[in-house]
Amino acid sequence: MTATPVNRSKGRSNRGLKGLAGVLFFVCLVLFLMAIEQKQAVEAWAAVRDGAAPAVSRIADWAADGASKGLDGLKTAAAGTPDSRPTATPNAVVLAGEFGPADDLTRETVGSATFAGATIRLERGETLRTRPLRIATGDQAYNTLGETFAARLNARPDAQIELRAVVPNDRQAAVPASPLCKGEAPGVVAVLHRRDQVELMMFRERTIVGGETPVDALCGVWRFRAR
């Protein structure tokens, strides 16, 4: 009776491929963080961690299994299955339509507001074109005093506040200055939509909303109710 030789080369190869996948991910992550501003690094890391970690895990498993099906197998591992991708909840409500002022300050300052896709039109003449930034929760601070969205907007700690960047329209080279921001251009709006109510916070340009935001970066807070 003769002993059957153990094939260790495949195991070593699989471990090598798995290690290589991990090293490549780490290098790409470092280069990505070096390419953005330091203040955005934490947010960027959270996005990379939540979005890319599952894909990296699948790629590592693909490598450990012997890199089956070659390049096609790698693409499948990176993409994952359609069912595993995040989707909007069935009862998600799209913010659209006209909302009237819900308090005297809003009535005197901006009047009503109309939401149409990425555009916010204010009755007093302001039209804001926006693009999505991220979702903040109510318990997150929006200035250096540690004030939270929940406290300012009388919202739940887990309320979802939509942060949008204000961008120039097709005929503008830059976002124009606004009297709502003391003569400066608005840069970010925070929107909280609750059934028939909408709260809108506006921040001046070049503001990264968070715990390091200067207190005077907030231009105003206005409240609306559906008509």
Image: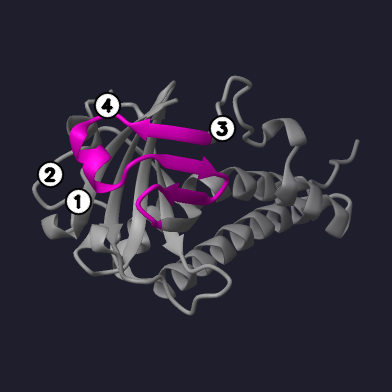
Location of mark 4 (residue): 157
Badge 4 amino acid: Pro
Badge 3 amino acid: Val
| Residue 104 spot, x, y in % from top left | 19, 34
Location of mark 2 (residue): 146
Q: Who comes first in sequence, dot 4 or dot 3?
A: 3
Task: Work out whether residue 87 or residue 123 is closer to the camera in this orientation and state it.
Answer: 123
Q: Who comes first in sequence, dot 1 or dot 4?
A: 4
Q: Does residue 219 lie above or below 141 as drawn?
A: below
Stretch in magenta? 97-126
How much space separates mark 2 and mark 4, taking CA atoms? 14 Å
Q: Who comes first in sequence, dot 1 or dot 3?
A: 3
Residues at marks 3 and 2 touching, judged by CB atoms closer than 8 Å? no
Residues at marks 1 and 4 touching, judged by CB atoms closer than 8 Å? no
How much space separates mark 1 and mark 4, taking CA atoms? 16 Å
What residue sits 64% from the left and 33% below the top? 87
How much space separates mark 1 and mark 3, taking CA atoms? 28 Å
Task: Work out whether residue 50 or residue 205 is closer to the camera in this orientation and state it.
Answer: 205
Please tell me whether mark 3 or mark 2 is closer to you in this view: 3
Location of mark 3 (residue): 94
Q: Is residue 67 visible?
A: no
| Residue 80 spot, x, y in % from top left | 73, 41
| Residue 151 spot, x, y in % from top left | 17, 31
Q: Does residue 128 lie above or below 185 as drawn?
A: above
Badge 1 amino acid: Gly
Please tell me whether mark 4 or mark 3 is closer to you in this view: 3
